Image (cartoon, grey):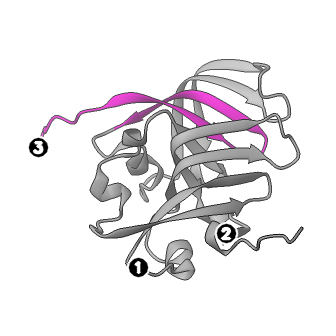
Amino acid sequence: MDASPRTHRFLPADILTSSYRIAGKVMVSTNGVMGVMNDPTHSFMEVHDARMARIHMPSKLVDHFEVVRMLKRQVFAVALARREDLGPQMIVRGGYGLVTEYPIRLTTQVYEIEGKIETPGKRFDFSSLMAEGSRDFVPIFDAVLTAILIPNLRVESPGMLFNRSLVDLLALQAQRVKLQQ
């Protein structure tokens, strides 16, 4: 019987759903939060020491639980305190050594996120980012998340994951049209 030791640790994270912001700790292995969120063998996740707030009142604590269990498909974004908490560089970059960084803006039904994504090669390929591969949660760096209807909800994070299946639109900041005055 193989009894290889696995290193597990807790990492602080803010998890955002359509109606709640959950601040707590996620247990991760050496693959970081990307390993937990993109694990196809588990459709749920656990958040320990979970403090819950409704998104329309983000500073008011609603409840506090030792553990809450969530369906990953309902998670819009996971904000982390450090970029390194996403996981090892090769997992975060999807195995690619040469990547290009793109400042983007994306929207979901509830949130807007601005930040930088890294994609392989020298050309931006929307279809491969949003449809190819097995990872549903994509890393975005130096991210700022705001709620569309609740401007006082603002989450800044050096490393964040967004659920690509919940994205309504994605725009490259370099393609923004300058308004004439």
User: In this view of the protein, which residue sits in the foreground, 148 or 110?
Assistant: 148
Magenta residue check for 130: no
Q: Main secondary structure of the magenta part?
A: strand
**Dot 3 or dot 2, earlier in sequence:** 3
- Mark 1 secondary-structure assignment: loop
Crowding near the residue tagged with mark 1, few <14, some 14–19, many ≥20 C-alpha atoms within 10 Å = few
Which numbered dot is residue 2? 3
Name the residue tied to disc 2: 170
Residues tagged 3 and 2 counted as in contact (Cβ below 8 A): no
Q: Amino acid at mark 1?
A: Lys
Crowding near the residue tagged with mark 3, few <14, some 14–19, many ≥20 C-alpha atoms within 10 Å = few
Q: Give the x, y percent position of residue 64.
A: 66, 18
Name the residue tied to disc 1: 122
Residues tagged 2 and 1 counted as in contact (Cβ below 8 A): no
Q: Amino acid at mark 2?
A: Leu
- Mark 2 secondary-structure assignment: strand
- Would you place residue 6 above or below residue 49 in this image? below
Q: Quadrant of the C terminus?
A: bottom right
Q: CA distance from mark 3 to mark 1?
A: 43 Å
Residue 59 falls in which quadrant of the image? top right
| Left or right, 55 with reference to 6 | right
Q: CA distance from mark 3 to mark 2?
A: 45 Å
**Dot 3 or dot 1, earlier in sequence:** 3
- Would you place residue 121 above or below residue 112 in this image? below
Q: Give the x, y percent position of residue 40.
A: 43, 59
Most extreme residue toward the front is 181
